[in-house]
Image (cartoon, coloured by chain):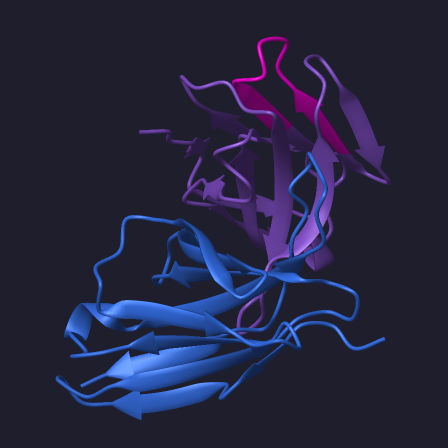
Chain colours: A blue, B purple
């Protein structure tokens, strides 16, 4: 049973460029959430996708956008990259309904902006 | 704004010692989770607590949810080098308008020396 898979694992971009990160959820899961984790910090919620729609969004600018496909996989897009966007981007999947919020995380995509 | 404060942020102990990590908030959470994260990997769920006053044990780890569901603690007995890692608490609030966002603490980095 495959867990959450993310690609690429590492990438380097320069300021102003755009990046797309990809995520395949755990088998049987239909909800995908994206988190940003800066070095030495806890993850911060970016947004969540369910039934191909953004269901909830954290405090991130419009430069951060996403998409969910019919097979439940998801993409995170970041435009006009800033140095401060350098972080580990984590994808997490879950299967509602649940009132416990258990998430299964991928290993993350490490983005470095130069 | 809901916040979770973890303490201590860093902990370096000798093998065999006991330790407690605290996770505090002024907000009430529907559930509280503890994750462990190793370098280069995503967080892995250790436990979920949902009832005020609930205590759960996972081998040498004991987790407690505060009576008012605003705080939690993680106690490790006889720590081993394999316990080394970043410990994260995360709170969730579930309702019709909140369907999956987790608030993470900033994490506690634990180093257990042999």
Q: Which residue is pictured at 16% across the width and 79% down the height?
A: A80
Q: Is residue B103 magenta?
A: no
The picture places residue B61, in percent across and down from the top left corner, at 76, 37
Could you tell whether B87 is left or right of B107 in the image?
right
Could you tell whether A38 is left or right of B21 in the image?
left
| In the image, residue A11 above or below residue A85 | below
The picture places residue B62, in percent across and down from the top left corner, at 76, 30
| In the image, residue B91 above or below residue A15 | above
Q: Which residue is pictured at 48% across the width and 61% down the height?
A: A53
Number of marks in the rendered image: 0
| In the image, residue B113 above or below residue B107 | below
Front position in the image: B30 or A51: A51
Q: Quadrant of the C terminus of chain A?
A: bottom left
Front position in the image: B4 or A74: A74
Front position in the image: A105 or A34: A34
Identify the image quadrant of residue A65: bottom left
Q: Is residue B69 magenta?
A: yes
Please state the extent of the stretch shown in magenta in the rendering. Answer: B62-73
Q: Residue furthest top?
A: B67
Q: Quadrant of the N terminus of chain A?
A: bottom right
Could you tell whether A34 is left or right of B16 in the image?
left
Could you tell whether A62 is left or right of A24 in the image?
left
Query: Residue B80: in sight, yes or no?
Result: yes
Q: Which residue is pictured at 46% across the width and 40% down the height?
A: B103
| In the image, residue B47 above or below residue A62 | above
Query: Residue B113: in sight, yes or no?
Result: no
Identify the image quadrant of residue A106: bottom right
The picture places residue B91, in percent across and down from the top left corner, at 54, 34
Q: Which residue is pictured at 63% across the width and 41% down the height?
A: B34
């Amino acid at each position: 049973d495959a867990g959450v898979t993310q690609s690429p694992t590492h990438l380097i971009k320069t300021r102003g460029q755009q990046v797309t990160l990809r995520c395949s959820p755990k088998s049987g899961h239909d909800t995908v959430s994206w988190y940003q984790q800066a070095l030495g910090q806890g993850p911060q919620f970016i947004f969540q996708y369910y039934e191909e729609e953004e269901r909830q969004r954290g405090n991130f600018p419009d430069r951060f956008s996403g998409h969910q496909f019919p097979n439940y996989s998801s993409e995170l897009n970041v435009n006009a990259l800033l140095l401060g966007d350098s972080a580990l981007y984590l994808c997490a999947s879950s299967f509602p309904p649940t009132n416990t919020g258990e998430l299964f995380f991928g290993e993350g995509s490490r983005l470095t902006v130069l | 704004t809901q916040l979770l404060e973890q303490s201590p942020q860093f902990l370096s102990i000798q093998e065999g010692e006991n330790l407690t990590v605290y996770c505090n908030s002024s907000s009430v959470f529907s559930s509280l989770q503890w994750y462990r994260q190793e370098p280069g990997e995503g967080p892995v769920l250790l436990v979920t607590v949902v009832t005020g006053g609930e205590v759960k044990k996972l081998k040498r780890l004991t987790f407690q949810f505060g009576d008012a569901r605003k705080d939690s603690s993680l106690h490790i007995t006889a720590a081993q080098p394999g316990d080394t890692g970043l410990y994260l608490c995360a709170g969730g609030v579930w309702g019709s308008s909140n369907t999956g966002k987790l608030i993470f603490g900033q994490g506690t980095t634990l180093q257990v020396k042999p």
